[in-house]
């Protein structure tokens, strides 16, 4: 029993040991209403597909994965429940008008130019921390 438990523990740890996600172009939009969004490009360099399951932030009371959808001049936000699939060897970009991390009830002491802590939670790679800068427009 101990040997099986040790093997299970080792096998579960090795599945995360080779996790390779490249995160770039991260930034966050801050609005006066206390709502914001986080944008980032995620490159999956792993030999396996990955799923962005959720996010959290110490700077906001709530963080959720959303997708902006436009239909006949009407824009709405869809909450993504099952996460965002990121196939092995491919990129996924969270950007204005598409997927993004929605931040609700952002800390009122934050200002444009500040950096916030955001943790992305992946199915296999676990938690990955970002520190995007607060902007009104994309930095690129």
Image (cartoon, helix red, strand yellow):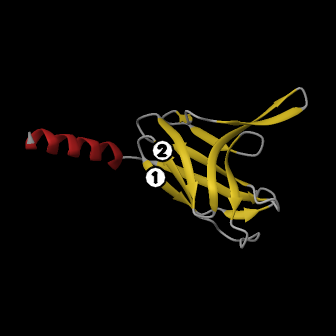
In this picture, residue 74 sits left or right of residue 133: right
Residue 47 falls in which quadrant of the image?
top left
Please state if 5 lies on the left or on the right of 124 as rendered. left
Q: Residue at x 72, y 64 (%)?
A: 134
| Relative image position of residue 129 (x, y in whole percent) | 52, 58
Q: Is residue 70 above or below residue 113?
A: above
Marks 2 and 1 sit apart, C-alpha to C-alpha, by: 6 Å
Q: Earlier in the sequence, mark 2 or mark 1?
A: 2
Badge number at residue 92:
none
Can you give x and y, in whole percent of width and height, for residue 121 in the image?
Answer: 49, 48
Q: Position of residue 118 (x, y in %)?
A: 58, 58
Residue sitting at 58 percent across and 63 percent down?
58
Q: Which quarter of the rendered picture does the C terminus lie within?
A: bottom right
Within 10 Å of disc 1 (Cα), the crowding (few <14, some 14-19, many 20+) is some
Q: Kindly give the residue lying farthest to the right in the view shown.
A: 73
Q: Does the CB distance between marks 2 and 1 fall below 8 Å?
A: yes
| Viewer-side residue, 26 vs 70 | 70
**133 in relation to 82, above or below:** below
Q: Which residue is mark 1?
A: 127
Secondary structure of the residue carrying numbered label 1: strand
- State whether residue 25 is above or below residue 116: above
Residue drawn at (65%, 68%), measured in percent from left and top? Answer: 115
**Horizontal placement of 11 versus 135: left or right?**
left
Quarter containing the N terminus: top left
Residue 139 visible in this rendered orientation of the protein: no
**Place of residue 75 in the rendered image (x, y in percent of width and height, measured from the top left):** 84, 35
- Left or right of residue 12: residue 24: right
Would you identify the image quadrant in which residue 48 lies?
Answer: top left
* Mark seen at residue 122: 2
Tag 2 secondary structure = strand
- Classed neighbour count for the residue bearing mark 2: other residues with Cα under 10 Å, few (<14), some (14–19), many (≥20): many
Q: Nearer the viewer, residue 91 or 5?
A: 5
């Amino acid at each position: 029993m101990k040997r099986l438990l040790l093997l299970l523990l080792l096998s579960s740890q090795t599945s995360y040991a080779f996790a390779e996600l490249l995160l770039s172009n991260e930034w966050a939009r801050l609005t006066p209403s206390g709502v914001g969004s986080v944008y980032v490009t995620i490159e999956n360099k792993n030999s396996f597909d990955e799923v962005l399951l959720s996010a959290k932030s110490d700077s906001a009371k709530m963080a959720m994965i959303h997708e902006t959808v436009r239909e006949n001049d009407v824009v709405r936000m869809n909450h993504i429940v099952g996460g965002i699939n990121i196939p092995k060897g491919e990129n996924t970009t969270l950007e204005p008008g598409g997927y993004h991390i929605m931040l609700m009830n952002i800390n009122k002491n934050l200002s444009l130019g500040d950096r916030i802590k955001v943790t992305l939670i992946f199915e296999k790679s676990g938690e990955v921390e970002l520190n995007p800068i607060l902007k009104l427009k994309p930095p690129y």
